[in-house]
Image (cartoon, rainbow, N blue to C red):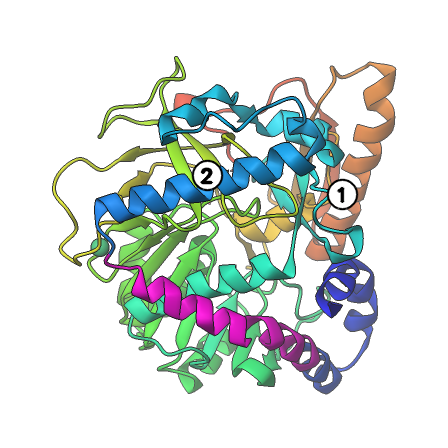
Amino acid sequence: MLEPLVRNNLPRLQGLYDRVPAPARDLLVSARGWLLTQIRYSAETLAMLRALRAGEFWSAEQIYLYQLGALRRTLDLAVRTVPHYAGYSCATIRNVEDLRQFPVLDRETVLHNQVHFLSRAVPPRQRIRAGTTGTTGASLRVAYTEKLARANWAFLLRQWAWAGVEPRHPRITLQGARVVPASRTDPPFWTYNAAERQILMSIFHLSEKTAPDYLGFLWKHAGKVLEGFPSVLGILADFALDRGMQIPMSVVFTSGEPLYPSLRAKIEQAFQARVFDTYGMTEYCGLIQECERGEMHLAPEYGFLEILDERGEPAAPGTEGDFVWTGFLNEAMPLIRYRIGDRGRWQAGGPCPCGRSFPLVVPTITRESDILRCPDGRLFSPRALNQLLKQSVSLRFCQFVHDRPDRVVVRAVPRTAPGTAQNNGGAMAEVLRIRTSLEHLLGPCMQVITDLASEPIARRGGKIPLIVNEVPQ
Ligand SMILES: [Zn+2]
């Protein structure tokens, strides 16, 4: 029961963490890691992993029946305990099509009525709160439980098994945690979590200058599992390939961003390993994982997926539509028919050669972004800057425009029209807070200014990049 207490206070603990020397940081990271192992490798987690592995070769009919049962349980919980669903009835769910009696739920609706989506079945002190950003917009505070954290880890370990990796295999992680203070210019740019034999590398210190440190360190740890955001691993792959280096790792896991084919090829070449991609989200209502045959499988025990066309009807196989999820695992905040804002299609054609009947889905999310290249050689991935938006609630969009070599504009589109009194308070305060964090991250060599706009900068096809690089390279 410690996890909600620790997780909910992490932003406050960060300041303390940044002030202690490197060996003490390793100790703190290991202590945090030990706490997480109590969840990740608990008897319940490992039992769930066994159950998931046993269900891998279910027939299509077994999958259908499992999902129908899980839908009924989820709807029942929501109708009984979640204020937003108080007026609904789930008595008439005879087949999965009956789910359509519930309306599609947009992210905006959840964002503006977050407390109405919390279930009374989970007491407040057991709620873990996580911030999520849709990469360019306002942050949604999602509540979940320790039970969900365990289940989520069991699904991760199942994919590890597909990749031939045992639980607790030593790994190197490049995700959003600020493991090293921003002002640091010399190694180490990493910390150790002894409890899990894990090394956490900073994604905020990548630069042409630090590239040899990163590569030298990775070289010493060749053969481990490498996991991280695609754009970040792409930067590291460039560092290696530009120097004619290859660093063999056992396997690479990517998540959190689209993995474009060119990015995958580069990462596989630099690290001489297969990449296994995952599509998931902080709302914890669905999961799609790549198998050893390179296909993306829906995890049917995690959530129910609809792919809908613009009329709200099911899209035909092979036709792109909106992802609409009903998650089975989050008892603290069950979301029903949640349109997350990503798109994809059912893959037409036969079953996967891996033998699993889990439906094949192709996520076609194209969250476009450039990489921020500072004149002193530092590189910031979209995920590194995205972390700055985690607390933001009043902005519809926020982009980082690199318009001059030494300048970045925090360009925000408030939820209300610019100039109205309402937006001048909340939105401006948030933009200034983002500017301060960005100044802290980029240091004195970059100037940061702010700009409120009424529309985001969009590219061909309406894509809205997080980082817009206007400086000729
Ligand atoms: Zn497969």
* Residue for badge 2: 71
Q: Is residue 443 left or right of residue 207?
A: right
Mark 2 residue type: Leu
**Magenta extent:** 30-57
Q: Is residue 90 magenta?
A: no
Is residue 176 something one can see in this rendering? Answer: no
* Residue assigned mark 1: 435
The image quarter in which residue 317 lies: top left
- Taking 370 as reference, is 345 left or right? left
Q: Nearer the viewer, residue 25 or 406?
A: 25
Q: Nearer the viewer, mark 1 or mark 2?
A: 2
Is residue 297 visible in the rendered structure shown here? yes
From the viewer's side, name the closer residue of 226 and 35: 35
Q: Could you tell me which secondary element the residue under label 2 belongs to? A: helix
Taking the image as shown, residue 210 lies to the left or right of residue 222, namely right
Q: Residue furthest front?
A: 91
Mark 1 is on which residue type?
Arg
- Indicate whether 337 appears above or below 406: above
Q: In front: 109, or 459?
A: 109
Q: Report the residue at 61% width, 48% height from top.
A: 331
In the rendered view, does 313 fall on the left or right side of 379? Answer: left
Question: Residue 393, image x and y in percent?
Answer: 73, 34
